Amino acid sequence: MSIPHKTRCHWPGERPHDIIYHDEEWGVPVHDDRKLFEFLLLDAFQAGLSWTTILKKRENFREAFDNFDAKKISEYGDEKIKDLLNDKGIIRNRLKIHSAISNAKLFLNIQKEFGSFDNYIWQFTEGETIVNIRKEMADIPVSTIESDAMSKDLKKRGFKFVGTTICYAFMQAAGMVNDHTVDCFRYLEVGK
């Protein structure tokens, strides 16, 4: 696969999965509940691992977790859990699998309470993307007051694997923050 050379953030390196994700998704505002749940689930599985590992297994996760359908996931029973624990295409971590199921139930509760998960989650940035001015990757924090507030509220509601660092990674993925470095070709593009 040939990827055109452009000035971009340094974190994707030369890894094709990371470059495609960076160039097409990272930092783009997401308001679709299914996509938001996908990022919530994937970020929870990322805990303690690299995002590259998750991206390489993303399509396997999509298949294993019914295209990230929170309703279907919320109904998973013992047989499905056993299947997931034996699925070599995903991260086979019992706690993370169980948390995906319980988080799906809580996600559905939030949809009922707020009309959509989108309405709920974007309140942490007052419905707008926070546009940061980062000159280099070292300028990007691992958490912010917004991710702290998000983490605290999600935990209060019973969510698992939603520490402030994971919440900040979620915010970056969902375009709640624009953390592209200012020299990156995507910095201005995602802001449009």
Image (cartoon, rainbow, N blue to C red):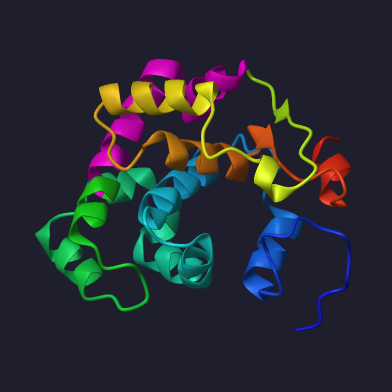
Vertical placement of residue 114 versus 142, above or below: above
Q: Is residue 87 left or right of residue 192?
A: left
Query: In the depicted view, which residue is nearer to us: 133 or 117?
Result: 133
Q: Residue furthest front?
A: 138
Q: Is residue 64 left or right of residue 53?
A: left
Vertical placement of residue 28 versus 177, above or below: below
Q: Residue furthest bottom?
A: 1
Vertical placement of residue 129 versus 85, above or below: above
Q: Residue at x 35, y 70 (%)?
A: 90
Q: Residue furthest left?
A: 78
Q: Which percent across, then down, holds residue 138?
A: 67, 46
Query: In the depicted view, which residue is nearer to us: 97 or 18?
Result: 18
Residue 189 is inside the magenta segment: no
Q: Residue at x 41, y 56 (%)?
A: 46
Q: Where, quadrant-wise, is the C terminus in this rendering?
A: top right
Query: In the depicted view, which residue is nearer to us: 67 or 120?
Result: 120
Q: Quarter of the image holding residue 28?
A: top right
Q: Which percent across, then down, holds residue 53?
A: 47, 69
Q: Is residue 74 left or right of residue 144?
A: left
Q: Where, quadrant-wise, is the N terminus in this rendering?
A: bottom right
Q: Is residue 34 left or right of residue 26?
A: left
Residue stretch in magenta: 101-126
